[in-house]
Amino acid sequence: MEMSEFLALASTNCMSVFLICIKNRCGELSGNIVNFYLKEPVAFCGILDMALKIDILCTRLSRPMATTEMRFLDEHMRKTYEKQMLNQVYAPLKTCSDIQEIDKFMSLAAKAYETLVIEIHQRQFSSMQGRMKGACQKGKFVSFRSALELMRMLRGYEYIRNEKITKRQ
């Protein structure tokens, strides 16, 4: 990510814009999720983990608001989810109401193998809608209509990335 793009990202007041810093060069995607309203990055390992954590962060930041209630198989599963994922004591994601210092995140992005920007525009029908931008799309935003579609796009990116590495060897 170029410095101008990073500064433009920092100047937005959008809580639902996430910078994905990919740490590994090949294999399953892993790294950190960064948002300027988080006091520290959130680690993820795998595409599913990343999508679920972005959803939790949107819930915690209250942006964008979900239009439907989450459904569970039973009341016990609902309480377990709320206790494990949404409760600050059990899952401490440090959020704040002010934008954090940009320098802290710039160094994280500079160390990343690659960065992606994921914007969540809506959370309708128990899913996420938005757009994604990164080197894999040649710097253009590509929209997704559901979390499943986002995960398919990322899986395709993961496959192409791994294929390039094996061809070089």
Image (cartoon, rainbow, N blue to C red):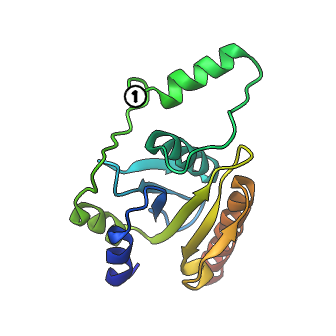
x and y, in percent, of residue 46 in the image: 59, 51
Q: Amino acid at mark 1?
A: Gln
Task: For residue 169, say whether it is visible.
Answer: no
Q: Where 141 falls versus 151 (above or below)?
A: below
Residue at point 24%, 61% (across, down): 104
Q: Where 46 falls versus 105 (above or below)?
A: above
x and y, in percent, of residue 96 in the image: 30, 44
Task: For residue 140, say whether it is visible.
Answer: yes
Location of the N terminus (image quadrant):
bottom left
x and y, in percent, of residue 69 in the image: 68, 33
x and y, in percent, of residue 99 in the image: 28, 56
Q: Where 133 falls versus 30 (above or below)?
A: below
From the viewer's perspective, is 166 left or right of 102?
Answer: right
From the viewer's perspective, is 73 left or right of 105?
Answer: right
- Location of mark 1 (residue): 88
Residue at point 41%, 47% (across, down): 42
The residue sitting at the right extreme is: 73
Tell how many labels: 1
Q: Residue 163 falls in which quadrant of the image?
A: bottom right
Crowd tier of the residue under label 1, counting other residues whose Cα lies within 10 Å: few below 14, some 14–19, many 20 or above: some
Q: Residue 13 falls in which quadrant of the image?
A: bottom left
Location of the C terminus (image quadrant):
bottom right
Circle 1: element type: loop
